[in-house]
Amino acid sequence: MRRMTAAWRRYGLDELARQYSPSSRAPDMQYCLSEYAKRSESARRLLDVHEAVAYGPAPEQRFDYFPAERPGAPLHVFVHGGYWQELGRAESSFAAIGMVAAGAAFIALGYPLAPGYSLPAITAMVGEGIRWLCGHAPQLPGAPGRIHLSGHCAGAQLVAHALADTGAWQRSGIDPLAAVGSATLLGGVYDLEPLVGTYINEPLGLDGPTARACSPQHGPLVRMPPLLVGRGESETDEYARQHREFVARARSCGTDVTDLVVAGRHHFDLPLDLGRGATELGAGVLRLMGLRPETEG
């Protein structure tokens, strides 16, 4: 595995930083970020929502919950990106309207950010949140059913790490393969070692061993619930490599993986397809949740 994941070492630091700057391939990044916020605000205005529900003691351990119209509906939990240092649940409900319309409940999961918290602490807290939801979802208003996870960029790392944390699941008494119906990982960084020498690491403060410990690509070989691992066609070579290698690793553990590269999408506009059944990504996610995309009539 070391031979596969060392390809990034051929880059100089300047090129490595560019490879891990997804905005270099997304000229409309600011528009996409504004859409996250605008569509999330619309969801809170138009839908029934329970805001800032606590899943842990830290003030940032909160989620916004949008119930489905019927009990027992699948629950989609979205973990936002932002390189562990930006964005939050206020900008993370953009898929709620589409999910609720399709018959699902929806949660935007917030979490603490760097540099106020270390990456190991952030990773642990998100894992706590996912396990908390697996144990408490039936008690939420509307009594949602099985949980389906998604994460974008940093959120993909956080979801993947949580799913593979066998010790934490054992301590919780919850079987992740029974509790989690699927997970969708978008534009993820699954090996954090290449970030150590870049500007991205300045607020994170990672060293090599800590980066490896937080990397799903280097974690235990664990079979996960069915995965959809997606990226936009217009990503850097390093994002594409990380995608390929994580798909291969997950499949080597017997995980059922849908490998999706979406034409005409980049790192920032791809998540906007979540909950939109007329899109390739949106339809795939809804099918994993047992819901029929609108394109199927």
Image: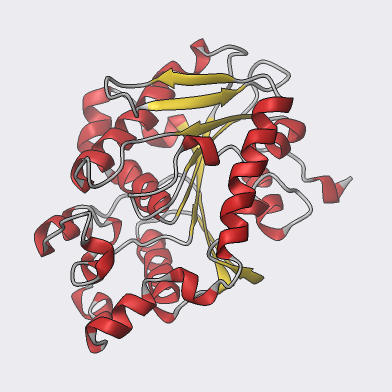
At x 47%, y 62%, the residue is 187
Of 75 and 288, nearer the camera is 75
Q: In which quarter of the view is residue 237 placed? A: bottom left
At which x and y percent is residue 209? 10, 60
Q: In which quarter of the view is residue 61 placed? A: top left
At which x and y percent is residue 296? 85, 49
Q: Number of marks in the image? A: 0
At which x and y percent is residue 284? 66, 52
Eyeballing the image, is 40 above or below 221? above
At x 23%, y 72%, the residue is 1
The colour scheme used here is: secondary structure
At which x and y percent is residue 18? 37, 78
Eyeballing the image, is 24 above or below 227? below
Q: Can residue 263 be seen in this view?
A: no
Q: Is residue 294 visible?
A: yes
Q: In this view, does 124 lie to the left or right of 75?
A: left
At x 54%, y 28%, the residue is 146
Q: In this view, does 239 lie to the left or right of 121?
A: right
Which residue is farthest right? 297
Of 217 and 158, nearer the camera is 158
Eyeballing the image, is 9 above or below 67? below
Q: In this view, does 129 lie to the left or right of 77?
A: left
